[in-house]
């Protein structure tokens, strides 16, 4: 297969440079020119390149999966910048693993072989997914990309973008519309369906993707929807690896290693991938590189989403208010750490089912240690981004469980009050918090109103739904938000830790 090779500077990350790099870092041992593609991945961010692409690369290093190379794609205009950067270096990626003791392990991965043009009508993407060699279409489009209805947790098929795609399926806007259009082409050509593999942090992510695809197809072509339902598969999967955004420090780190990579990726020394073994058109031999296939994916998802992803929100919002820059700094702050631990132990862990090999308490300890890894420069700003989607997916399910069981929701109410306080757009020291949500202006406006009338925040039905009407939660939220404005973060957290405020 022909690759897009552009030679530039002497140490530019290109196939030509791999021979020299091989003395210092791990480089692809397989012939990339001989690879053929089997996966189209939509949403080529850092996480994808440190996770799914790494697992495929590792198989290729063993001489396996050579017909499972990845073609990158995007459906947002901003994806074009990443495309240009990666094509200039032939889609090679430098991965730098950072452990908490200062160690580094560096490798260059080559499993991705192309990046499709980013087009408003997604024509090239549709044609690529309709090719018979493509057997998996995977996605990392963030939680907000699924148009979830907070009341049902399912894709909102009345969303304007979904309706547009249903009416213009030949020229869709969304990833889902492009996938449906490609599946229609495959059916019409007499080809089988592909597997849709969601790699986003959503509970039941495969089921959500299935509902989005089949639901959208059903709006315009019920027969196509029925064909997809019978022919395609959408396995649930749990993905885990902390992967910060790339900034000047990461670029400089790659340069120190002698690698001129325009988009290097740093990541922690931990990865986990658990998924259902449900692939309608085959899959790579991922278990050979540590992927676990299990019928208990739902329980793994719940544990990770509630404890790790929810824990990120516990730390990030209060960290931003206090002017703390990174998650590791927040995790090492005694006040935040104490709040984090109490909320987890009292209000999150009791609703988590135990899994083989590790107790829930031990999993929390593992997450706590990972958060404190100061070799990973993961900013509170990155973790707090798109809080509406993340709180809905990571925090609110624990609140619902607590309310249903009669357990405490005091700490979780404080977490939500911290988010409302952060969305005011001003830290305690008076410095400004820059826009950090797709709906930042709307959230900031409501946060301003909630400063006077706290329950105004809970009236955002598209986020809180029925939770806003639960007096036990609403009273605690009201009290905590008032305290944050009247007494400040430290006094409010100390009161919570001391048990001065109870349900």
Image (spheres, rainbow, N blue to C red):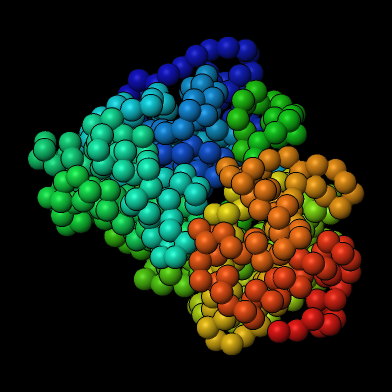
Give the residue at x 86% y 53%: 428
Q: Is residue 371 left or right of residue 54?
A: right
Q: Is residue 476 left or right of residue 70?
A: right
Is the residue 120 above or below the residue 235 in the image? above
**How many labels, in total?**
0
Q: Is residue 49 left or right of residue 3?
A: right
Q: Position of residue 325 (x, y in %)?
A: 80, 47
Viewer-proximal residue among 85 and 64: 85
Give the residue at x 62% y 72%: 363
Is the residue 271 above or below the residue 435 in the image? below
Give the residue at x 26% y 41%: 166
Q: Residue furthest bottom?
A: 406
Can I make out residue 51 in this image?
yes
Give the residue at x 47% y 61%: 150
Location of residue 377 (image quadrant): top right
Q: Position of residue 80 (x, y in %)?
A: 49, 25
Viewer-proximal residue among 162 and 137: 162
Q: Position of residue 202 (x, y in %)?
A: 47, 59
Q: Position of residue 491 (x, y in %)?
A: 89, 69
Location of residue 151 (image quadrant): bottom left
Can I make out residue 26 in this image?
no
Q: Is residue 180 left or right of residue 103?
A: left
Is the residue 118 above or below the residue 442 in the image? above
Q: Look at the image and tell me in which quarter the N terminus lies.
A: top left
Viewer-proximal residue among 138 and 322: 322
Location of residue 503 (image quadrant): bottom right
């Amino acid at each position: 297969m022909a690759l897009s090779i552009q030679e530039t500077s002497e140490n530019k990350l290109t196939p030509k440079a791999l021979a020299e790099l091989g003395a210092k870092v791990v480089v692809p041992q397989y012939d990339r020119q001989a690879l053929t593609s089997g996966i189209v991945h939509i949403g080529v961010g850092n996480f994808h390149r440190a996770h799914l692409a790494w697992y495929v690369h590792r198989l290729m290093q063993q001489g396996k999966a050579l017909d499972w190379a990845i073609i990158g794609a995007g459906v947002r205009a901003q994806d074009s910048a990443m495309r240009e950067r990666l094509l200039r270096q032939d889609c090679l990626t430098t991965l730098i693993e950072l452990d908490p003791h200062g160690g580094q392990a560096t490798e260059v991965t080559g499993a991705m072989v192309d990046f499709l043009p980013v087009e408003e009508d997604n024509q090239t993407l549709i044609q690529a997914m309709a090719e018979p060699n493509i057997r998996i279409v995977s996605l990392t489009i963030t939680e907000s990309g699924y148009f979830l209805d907070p009341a049902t947790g399912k894709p909102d098929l009345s969303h304007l973008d979904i309706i547009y795609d249903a009416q213009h399926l030949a020229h869709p806007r969304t990833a889902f519309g492009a996938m449906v259009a490609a599946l229609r082409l495959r059916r019409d050509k007499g080809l089988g369906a592909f597997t849709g593999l969601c790699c986003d942090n959503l509970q039941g992510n495969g089921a959500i993707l299935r509902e989005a695809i089949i639901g959208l197809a059903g709006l315009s072509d019920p027969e196509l929807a029925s064909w997809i339902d019978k022919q395609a598969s959408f396995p649930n999967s749990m993905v885990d690896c902390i992967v910060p955004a790339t900034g000047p420090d990461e670029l400089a780190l790659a340069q120190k290693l002698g690698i001129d990579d325009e988009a290097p990726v740093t990541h922690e020394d931990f990865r986990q991938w658990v998924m259902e073994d449900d692939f309608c058109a085959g899959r790579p031999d991922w278990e050979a590189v540590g992927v676990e296939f299990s019928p208990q994916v739902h329980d793994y998802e719940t544990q990770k989403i509630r404890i790790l992803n929810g824990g990120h929100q516990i730390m990030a919002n209060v960290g931003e208010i206090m002017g703390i820059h990174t998650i590791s700094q927040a995790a090492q702050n005694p006040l935040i750490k104490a709040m984090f631990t109490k909320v987890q132990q009292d209000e999150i862990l009791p609703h988590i089912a135990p899994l083989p090999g590790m107790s829930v308490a031990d999993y929390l300890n593992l997450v706590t240690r990972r958060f404190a890894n100061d070799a990973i420069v993961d900013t509170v700003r990155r973790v707090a981004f798109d809080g509406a989607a993340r709180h809905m997916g990571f925090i609110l399910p624990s609140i619902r469980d607590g309310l249903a069981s009669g357990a405490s929701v005091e700490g979780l109410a404080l977490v939500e009050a911290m988010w409302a306080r952060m969305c005011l757009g001003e830290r305690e020291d008076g410095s400004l918090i820059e826009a950090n949500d797709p709906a930042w202006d709307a959230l900031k406006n409501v946060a301003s109103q909630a400063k006077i009338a706290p329950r105004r925040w809970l009236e955002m039905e598209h986020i809180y739904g029925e939770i806003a009407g639960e007096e036990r939660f609403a009273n605690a939220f009201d009290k905590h938000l008032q305290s944050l404005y009247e007494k400040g973060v430290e006094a409010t957290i100390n009161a919570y830790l001391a048990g001065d405020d109870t349900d």
